[in-house]
Image (cartoon, grey):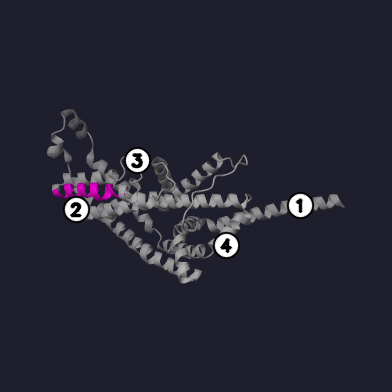
Amino acid sequence: MSQPLSATMGLEKWFFLALAAAVLFLAWQTVQPFVLVLLAAGIAAIMLTPLHVRMERLIRHRKLAAFLLVCGVFLLVALPVFFILLLMVKQASEILQSSLGEAGWLATFDPRSHPLFQSLPAFVQEQVRAWDLHALARNLAQWMFSNVGDLFSSTTRLVLNTFIFFIALYYILVDRQKMYDEILALSPFGDAMDRDIIHRIVLTVRSVVFGAVILAFVQGVLAAIGMSIFGVPGALIWGAITVVAAQVPLFGVGLVMIPAVLYLFFTGSTGAAIGLLIWAAVFVGLSDNVLAPYLIKGATHMHAFLVLIFIFGGLEVFGSIGIIVGPVILAAFLVVIELYKAGMLRGGSVPPPPQESSST
């Protein structure tokens, strides 16, 4: 009797594995279109959990606190971002028309007639004259603005993703303790190890978002304000590009601000060029030194080059949300490396993570 029973148990096991694989495949195919939206909601929940904990203690109602917090995020963040994106699309269209048209500034702009250019050595002037500056600038402008319209290529899709994001954010905040307990129950590691891993990832994600992303957004906003004041066309678009440029080591926001200053200078707006240069040095450049200590607060620091690579890789793989998803993946990767170095695979003890006052 034991052999048939053993054979039956083996058959049941393989049947269960096959059934589980089929169900997981179908589940993935169903959820896959919204994975990035759910991931973004999870990242937002990690960032908002300390605030939700405080609101819950004040209101003494978990669901109401989560609902009010989600509504606040929608009103204070989502709506302004939506209208800013609309303005960016409008500005991109205006820039294309004003710069690439037959009467656009690219058709008449020639820095080689500027006294500054004429003061350069003769061999440098010869090299620059050999360039087709109009074609170069036109190709650069087309490359930068060709995909701006993709942000709103499908209004229905955008509305659906936004709806799913906020619904997911609400339920993650409400049920975060249940999800935490389920992770502990399903993980093959010990509960203490799971808590260490989760805590490390949460702290690192918050450090990345605050240190690498929010600071870059602040610099992008300051850059956009300065360009608007001093008359640089497409200020919102250049501000968005500044967010990515802020991650480039050594050069940073200068990759955007310096060309903007040169544009004003070569188009005859010398006073505006000097004003924008001062604005960039005082407000945009120094914001890194002023705000970084308050935003990062001594949490995990990551190499700027790695952050840059993962931001560009995230943008390439995941689209616009990749500017946040990329650094978060880097954070998880560094946590895995740290746990490996601590001896997890050898059964070693993992050092406790740094403590944080707020709840994860």
Whether label 1 touches label 2, CB < 8 Å: no
Please state which of the two labelled residues, at mark 1 or mark 4, is closer to the viewer.
Answer: 4
Residue 105 horizontal side relative to residue 7, left or right:
left
Mark 4 crowdedness (10 Å alpha carbons): few <14, some 14-19, many ≥20: few
For the point 51% across and 48% down, which residue is it? 353
- Between the C-alphas of marks 1 and 3, the distance is 58 Å
User: For the view shown, which residue lies furthest in the right direction?
Assistant: 1
| Secondary structure category for the residue under label 1 | helix
For the point 37% across and 67% down, which residue is it? 75
Residue type (three-letter) at the residue carrying disc 3? Pro
The residue that label 1 is drawn on is 11
Residue type (three-letter) at the residue carrying disc 2? Phe
- Between the C-alphas of marks 2 and 4, the distance is 52 Å
The residue that label 3 is drawn on is 249
For the point 24% across and 44% down, which residue is it? 259
Residue 301 horizontal side relative to residue 107, left or right:
right
The residue that label 2 is drawn on is 230
- Is residue 202 within the magenta segment? no
Q: Position of residue 175 (x, y in %)?
A: 54, 64
N-terminal of the two: label 1 or label 4? 1
Please state which of the two labelled residues, at mark 4 or mark 3, is closer to the viewer.
Answer: 4
N-terminal of the two: label 2 or label 4? 4
Q: Position of residue 161 (x, y in %)?
A: 45, 61
Quick one: 199 or 172, which is closer to the camera? 199
